Amino acid sequence: MEYEKFIQCIKRTKGIYAKGTFRQEAIYEKLRERGDDYWLHLERKSEDELGKEVITGFLNKWECRLDKPETERGKQLKCNLKKAVDQLPEYYAGLKGFRLENMQFGKDNLFLIDCIYSIFRQIKPKFGAVPASKLMHMALPSLFMMWDDGIIKEYGVKKQVLPYFERRVWSYTAFLVLMEENIHHIRKTNPSGPSVTYDELFGQINTQCEERDLPITRLLDMANYAISRERNTFQKCRKCVEVASQRLDTMEWYDKLAKPQKPFFDC
């Protein structure tokens, strides 16, 4: 995605937020104020705390439409969410320090990412790709992206088989590779030139968009919102899609079953 288009998309999304009753950015800042340690270690929370603080206080406020914790299905959901987050610390620890803009995707870290995503996707009842991505982003915001159904559809993400999971689901790792490619393209086309460091670049973007220290993953999510909602004005970067697809075709996967038989993205 070219730099100027990226900035335009973010500003358009901010305009949409400003007109609605759901002030997403204010809520995002409040959620981040809980601290990195809070989100990285949800296993320290009880089932009731997960129901109140995470399901009701976060995911359902962000339109995930999960079962309410006080209902019978909701009680089952928060119990299974607790079982899931109890499994995650060792996987998160294996990815500590990684950032999306310079991620070296190999079979070891692909396996860790897919394991985390797989654990969330196995939660029942009704815990899909969207809430999984939101909790992954909050735990490791410099690495993981949020997405929603509109973004998945717009980018034409394909399905893959995950470890410990019998059915094919949307390929979250493929989406991360594509978003990393977008970051590289943004850097190459920014007004300061390609020699700017990533930290300088992200600070420059925050300043231009009148934000404060948002991670690039969140800024990309805001741009993706405009791309997925206003297709007549904003389109996905086909160059980034093409390069990402080529990378995915040549990547070494941890298991041949993890690689889908069809291309990851619809151009």
Image (cartoon, rainbow, N blue to C red):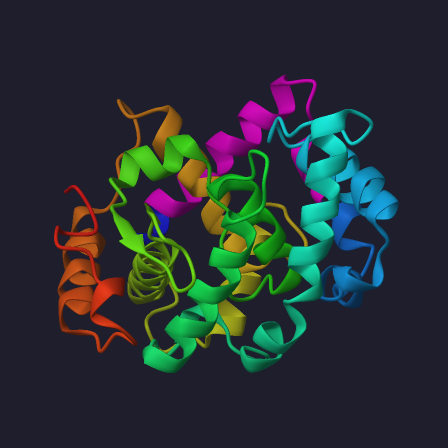
| Segment tinted magenta in the rendering | 5-28
Q: Look at the picture and state if 157 lies above or below 251.
A: above
Image position, residue 247 (x, y; %): 18, 68
Is residue 74 among the parts visible in the rendering?
yes
Task: Name the spot of residue 174 as percent of width and height, x first.
Answer: 30, 58
**Mostly what secondary structure, the magenta segment?**
helix
Instruction: Kindly identify the residue that appears in the image at 39 percent across and 64 percent down.
Output: 163
Say if 227 sits above or below 209 in the image. above
Q: Position of residue 149 (x, y in %)?
A: 41, 32
Q: Quadrant of residue 69?
A: top right
Left or right side of 30 for 263 = left
- Depicted 69 relative to depicted 119: above or below: above
At 73% from the left and 59% from the top, the residue drawn is: 39
Image quadrant for the C terminus?
top left
Q: Is residue 158 found inside the magenta-colored segment of the image?
A: no
Q: Position of residue 228 (x, y in %)?
A: 36, 31
**What residue lies at 64% left-to-right and 24% top-to-bottom?**
18
